[in-house]
Amino acid sequence: MPPNDPNNQPVQPYYGPPAEPAAGQNPTVVPPAAPQTFAPQAATGPQTPEQQPYNPRDYGFIVDPPKTGRSLPGIPLTGGSALKRGLVFGGGIVLLIIIVVIFASLLKSPNKFTALTPVAQYQTELVRIASGGENSVSAQPLQNLAYNVSLSLTSDNQQLLTYLGKNGEKLDSKTLALKHSASTDTSLANAKANSTYDSTFAKIIQDDLAGYMQSLKAAYASNPGPNGRKLLNQEYLNAELLLTQSQQPQS
């Protein structure tokens, strides 16, 4: 048995000395076998990766994601930043709406028919006083005045209310009666008890006609439109005639 190779290389097996050739045969020369070399091969079994020490920075993108939002001054966007952004945005929208409403109300032109309301109220009150005085005054001129005031202003009032209704303005009876004066009723009641009703009635009619004409001027200046100004102008002329009649001697 051949000795072991000191370099752990495999050697050819030994089969003993070659056999002697037979008589008359040439001996067979067997060339020596070429030496074989074997390179070491890497292990093919499962490999276990080398364990690396744990580094918290390797997982920073999970536990500490990058911040992309910007916080407003004094409002840190940490912990519920989406809610805070929503509150800030919603508050800004509400504030903007309030500003727009206030600005629009400042620019909004006043209702051009508002100035006509006092006109209708004066007409209603004068008709009420005149109707009550028709059967209470003693002088014939005052009876005629009371009748004319009641008839003329009742017609003017109806035309004015019709005009307002066509323009979307409606005045109820409660609004029309807002100029009802309790002090006027008291003065007329005392005058009847003191036998001074005629003079008291004439003065009240004159004062209320003057106030009524001022309201006509103010309504005309508010520019209620061509038809409205035409109507107010005619009613002013009617009131002027009544005022002139009230200033005539009543005895």
Image: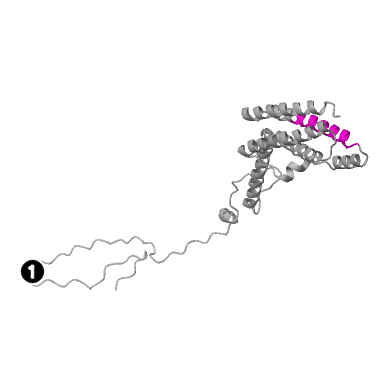
The answer to whether residue 76 is left or right of residue 199 is: left
Work out which residue is located at the far right of the displayed protein and give it.
Answer: 194
- Is there any visible trace of residue 104 in the rendered image? no
Q: Secondary structure at mark 1?
A: loop
Crowding near pointer 1: few (<14 within 10 Å), some, many (20+)?
Answer: few
Residue 220 higher or lower than 180, as above or below: above
Closest to the observer, 176 or 190: 190
Q: Quadrant of residue 115?
A: top right
The answer to whether residue 11 is left or right of residue 54 is: left
Question: At which x and y percent is residue 231?
Answer: 66, 30
Question: At which x and y percent is residue 201?
Answer: 85, 35
Q: Which image quarter is the N terminus in?
A: bottom left
Residue 219 higher or lower than 173, as above or below: above
Name the residue that disc number 1 marks: 25
Closest to the observer, 129 or 44: 129
Q: Quadrant of residue 199?
A: top right
- Is there any visible trace of residue 161 in the rendered image? yes
Applied colour scheme: one colour
- Tell me which segment is drawn in magenta: 196-215
Amino acid bearing label 1: Gln
